Image: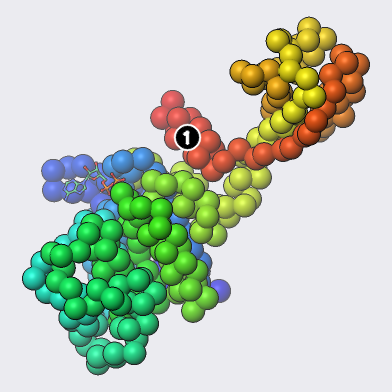
Amino acid sequence: MTAIVDVDNLTKTYDGGLTALSGVSLRIEQGEIIALLGPNGAGKTTLISALCGITSPSSGRATVGGHDIVTGYRKARAMIGLVPQEVALEPFERVINTVNFSRGLFGRRRDDALTEKILRQLSLWDKRRARIRELSGGMKRRVLIAKALVHEPRVLFLDEPTAGVDVELRRDMWRVVEGLRADGVTIILTTHYIEEAEAIADRIAVIDKGRILLVEEKTALMTRLGRKTLRIDLREPVEAVPASLADYDLELAPDGRSLSYHYDTRGDGTGITRLLQALAAAGLGLRDIQTTQSSLEEIFVGMIREGAA
Ligand SMILES: Nc1ncnc2c1ncn2[C@@H]1O[C@H](COP(=O)(O)OP(=O)(O)OP(=O)(O)O)[C@@H](O)[C@H]1O
């Protein structure tokens, strides 16, 4: 399969001498949702800016839809929708005109039905006659998304689309993203909200100090690097973990009503069977047991820490 976005050894050194991207290579297939995760200053925005033709790369090459982002800039850019991190909108313009104007910028004829569909999806239809300056911050973000979608891009870049917005907008956004995925749109998203990556991405790329540390299927990543926790709810609270269970490194909840046992799914055995026998031998009655997997956030924080070490 040919990649819709193909980044090959891309490097960006800013004029001041700072290298924000160092040999980044990444292939993204059509219809994928990929999340770029990384701490502040990792180079996520620089990567997006380079692919959208806002920043020119220092070396390396990249194509979008087969068009080189430098030599075939116009064709590459026409395939891209960009929702930037910062709000830059004309304050006195009306919502609907702002959105229609964006479509015109790409040489596309006005399509009222499409504009209406997008504005409705983003709960902006009732506000279509409002001037931008009359909107709340969250609504302005919705307008940015509408503007990015109105020329029907095949690749959508979302640079921290839900930073500082309420839960409702975040959920709306995720719904819009799902709809776009169903239409075969490829989505590249940067986010600080790891739960967002966990909720919507197919693959995760972790980027730090201008380098890609890892790109992997989200579910595989979580299985490979995740530890699991078994939580055991006790019938009667205890004051301390019985000495006979010391080998299991159990964590006792502050209220004494549950024990947590951490285990690695990659190991030969989980130790759960033995633990349950030991609990029975210690005379502890169980009310319930459940397992949870470590979150992407825990995995990510651990990885960045290891990378920094
Ligand atoms: N125009 C510029 N000129 C010089 N340095 C820049 C410029 N833009 C970004 N940088 C630097 O490049 C590095 C990467 O920045 P970038 O904005 O790409 O990171 P990011 O991963 O998007 O961070 P954040 O999560 O904070 O948005 C940072 O050290 C930043 O200070």
- What is the quadrant of residue 81 in the picture? bottom left
Q: Position of residue 222 (x, y in %)?
A: 61, 45
Number of labels in the image equals 1
Which residue is painted at 46% across and 52% down in the image?
196
Residue 159 image-quadrant placement: bottom left
Against 227, is 128 above or below? Answer: below
Residue 269 position (above or below residue 39): above
Residue 252 placement (x, y as % from top left) = 67, 18
Near mark 1 (Cα within 10 A), the count class, few <14, some 14-19 or many ≥20, is few
Q: Is mark 1 within 8 Å of ligand 1?
A: no
Helix, strand or loop at mark 1: helix
261 sits left or right of 105 in the view: right
**Which of these two is toward me, 122 or 86?**
122
**On screen, 88 above or below 255?**
below
Q: What quarter of the picture does the C terminus occupy?
A: top left
For this rendering, which residue is in front, 290 or 233? 233
Amino acid, disc 1: Val
Seen as rendered, the residue at the extreme left is: 92
In the rendered image, the quadrant that contains the N terminus is bottom right
- Residue 37: x %, y % from top left: 42, 47
At horizontal 80% and vertical 24% (from top left) the residue drawn is 235
The image's colour scheme reads rainbow
- Residue 201 position in % (x across, y down): 51, 58
Name the residue that disc number 1 marks.
Answer: 301
Can see residue 213? Answer: yes
